[in-house]
Amino acid sequence: MDCLLCHRQIRESWPLGFLMLPQKKRVTTTCSDCLVAFHKIDREMSCEGCGRQQNSRKLCQDCLKWQAKTTYDFSNRALFQYDEAMKTYMHDYKFQGNYQLRHVFDVTFSHFIGMQTEVDFLVALPIDRQTWQTRGFNQVTGLLTELSTTDLLVMDRQKKEKRQSQKKRRERLKTSNHFQIDVECPEQIKNKSILLLDDVYTTGRTLRHAAETLYAAGCRKVDSVTLCR
Amino acid sequence: MEKSDFYGRLVLMSRAEKNTTFKLRKMPTMLVSEKRVRCLRCNTWLVKAQVALPHEEFYCPACIQLGRVTTLDNFFTLVEPNHFKKLDHYLTWQGQLTTSQKRCSKEVIHSFQQGRDHLLWAVTGAGKTEMLFPGINEALKDGKRVCLASPRVDVCLELFPRLQAAFQHVEITLLHGRQTEPYRYTQLTIATTHQLLRFYHAFDVLIIDEVDAFPYAQNKQLLFATAQAKKTTGSCLFLTATPGDELLKKVHQKQLQVSYLPRRFHGFPLPEIQTKLALNWYGKIQNKKLPSAVKQFLKQCEESKRQFLLFVPHISHLEFVQKAVNQAFPKLYVTTVFSADDQRLEKVQLMRDHEVNGLITTTILERGVTFPEIDVCVLGADDDTFSSAALVQIAGRVGRSPKRPTGNVLFICAGLSRSVKKAIQQIKFVNHKAKEEENGLSAVSSPNT
């Protein structure tokens, strides 16, 4: 198997014990040289509100602002730092549309989600119709393996409007809420706890829009997990 | 988009796209069979399961750098109409060609007129580019669309000003991966071979420089691109100093016309390769010691104040070799150059400015760069990374200047590998050809390599 990122062959060791006691071996998709470029976030050294890497568990500047502005309870946890290596990866995966690259993180990310506290519903953030036509895949559900998510939300954006990733920070924060609840029976989400899943937490605007929509529909607790922050 | 943007090109647009002002030819992007799909731009077969998108759609990861080909899109194209404005004069270049250059360029023009493929085997430093000018000139005069493609960006960047100077009134488009200017429809195009994937039956004359260079040789994608970018009636001209087996086979089978340019522009033969055996050169270098042959070579360079290039097989060897050289020759100032080096261009410039005595490098400097009066040494020439083409190119770095048309080419290896032998043979063959030409003998046979 060649590494998905550098296309060089991955040399794997096959320990003796493995040969004697056959078990399902995890397929390595990325070589160790490429993986060291990504940096995991240390839980003890991350912001309690958004999960960004810093020096303590305290709320960061951005989260303090959110706390002053909003009344509901919301926090995010992230697995990786959104550094240069991760930006390149996201560019290739999401914007260039190399769907194969989901295998670089899908197992790790799904495992990370599985370690969070139990919730009633896992909800991957949806993409709008136009993105389905051009990109052809939802970058969040691509990163999940064997996890069952529920599609509670739909995203509806005006055609002319820019994507979040094309905007400046200030523009992003001004964006209005495009999420709507899409369930047949609204009773079924009343008083339920929900974990939102997304690829990147940047300003937190999108995730909070989703959370607001769900709280308005009567959910008890909404939190989120992202691949990077 | 303008109409001319579609002439002889494959433009990707969403399959839902409704074009209004003019009618376009619509073509599928991928061929879907039972278990596999084939990308119709780069001709790669892909396993369905690996390249599937949700909802039974597929994409091609092989040529994704040029914009993703998916079944969500269609190719749109228009037949190349050769709509070019006629000029009175195309070639503004005033220089003179040598007799053998003239002979070759006549043969090339003939092939262009016949619409046949042609191989031009010219030694390193023979003045290939100048020799092309008459051929390009004739093609432009006939209203043909011409493209000059090279596998290397550096070569394209270097060719562009030279061609612009030679054809001052002709508009030239330069296409490569880092290009920011938008595409323009012009009669003459300079492009990297990867960019050819974007064309479809566009060129009457397609010239491929350095056919043997990485990544063109052995890359089926690019070979397909060449075939597809050329019109069915068009002709292709391959330029090389070191033709590979496939091309030579075609020559033997008379499918390909061939011209030889065995003489450098200054008329001297290529410096021949000397080999020295050093069995444990790698072990020695790890202990910061140089094999005696290298020491001797460097000593000669130091005494005569000549610059040198020292090639090693892998990037990981660079550091050891530099340390070993520094220890043995503290007065020599050397630095290392490799592909991922941010300061690659600056370091090469240092060498040009005679700020350093020598460079220790990998195959990245095997071609394209010219330093006038240098010597060359290859450590571990029998390593797999050095193909015979690379070795001939490396040897061709030497003796480029008429002031010093000779020089040392030293290969240090633990044994004579096939590619080393082949390289030595090829150089001997072209030098022999040069002599033959001098004596007016035209009976030509290809080497038995």
Image (cartoon, rainbow, N blue to C red):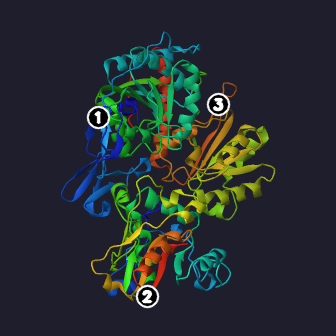
Marks 2/3: CA distance? 84 Å
Of residues B437 and A196, the one drawn nearer to the viewer in this rendering: A196
Looking at the image, residue B329 sits to the left or right of residue A16; the answer is right
Which residue corresponds to mark 3?
Answer: B406
Q: Is residue A82 above or below residue B377?
A: below
Indicate the amino acid at tag 3: Thr
Pointer 1 chain: B
Q: Badge 3: few (under 14), some or many (20 or more) residues near its Cα, within 10 Å?
A: some
Which tag, 1 or 3, sits closer to the chain's start?
Answer: 1
Marks 1/2: CA distance? 55 Å
Q: Are marks 1 and 2 on the same chain?
A: no
Which residue corresponds to mark 1?
Answer: B24
Residue B36 position in % (x across, y down): 24, 57
Circle 1: element type: loop
Q: Is residue B291 above or below residue B445?
A: below
Q: Is residue B430 above or below residue B292?
A: above
Pointer 3 chain: B
Residue B297 position in % (x across, y down): 69, 45
Looking at the image, residue B28 sits to the left or right of residue B128; the answer is left
Residue B324 quadrant = bottom right
Residue B295 position in % (x across, y down): 71, 50
Residue B34 position in % (x across, y down): 18, 58
Q: Identify the residue at image location x=39%, y=80%.
A: A217
